[in-house]
Image (cartoon, rainbow, N blue to C red):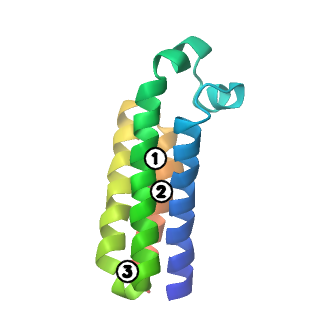
């Protein structure tokens, strides 16, 4: 079970690395505009804000990877729980303020990983 929890945490971290890439480097690309349902004008005007948000997603990924690599699922449980909790809160807030889809894309995978971590 610890292996399954580790994979779930790793997938959440990878997801947040992808968010970093989208928001910091690909924000104004047509495919990203379509993904987020934005216009080129909005993307240009919000590029700095998106890059900042991407950086925070990178910090979440870094915390998860650090906790997993340095301490594993059992020893790193407090660190991993903290960062997964942060991801869940960010996902719930995003769903409440931006788009309901964020709940399923961000918060749900983190909640599943957190549950698996504590079951392990």
Instruction: Find the distance from the CA under tag 3 to the CA under tag 2.
Output: 15 Å
Cα distance in 3D space between marks 2 and 1 = 6 Å
Describe the element under mark 2 as helix, strand or loop.
helix
| Residue 87 percent across, percent down from the top left | 38, 55
What residue is drawn where x is 43% and y is 61%? 62
Mark 3 surroundings within 10 Å by alpha-carbon count, few (fewer than 14), some (14 through 19), many (20 or more): some
* Residue annotated with mark 3: 118
Of callouts 1 and 3, the N-terminal one: 1
The disc placed on residue 108 is 2
Tag 1: Cα neighbours inside 10 Å, few (<14), some, or many (≥20)? many
User: Which quarter of the figure has residue 21?
Assistant: top right
SS for callout 1: helix
Looking at the rendered image, the quarter that the C terminus falls into is bottom left
Q: Residue at x 37, y 80 (%)?
A: 118
Residue position marked by numbered label 1 in the rendering: 103
Disc 2 residue crowd, few under 14, some 14–19, many 20+, Cα 10 Å: some
Between 65 and 94, the one lying in front of the other is 65
């Amino acid at each position: 079970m610890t292996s399954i929890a580790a994979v779930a945490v790793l997938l959440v971290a990878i997801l947040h690395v992808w968010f970093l890439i989208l928001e910091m480097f690909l924000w104004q690309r047509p495919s990203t505009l379509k993904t987020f349902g934005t216009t080129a004008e909005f993307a240009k005007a919000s590029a700095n804000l998106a890059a900042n948000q991407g950086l925070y997603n990178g910090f979440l990924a870094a915390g998860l990877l650090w906790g997993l690599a340095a301490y594993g699922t059992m020893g790193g449980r407090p660190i991993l729980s903290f960062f997964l909790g942060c991801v869940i809160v960010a996902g719930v807030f995003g769903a409440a303020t931006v788009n309901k889809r964020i709940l399923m894309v961000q918060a749900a995978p983190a909640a599943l990983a957190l549950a698996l971590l504590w079951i392990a």
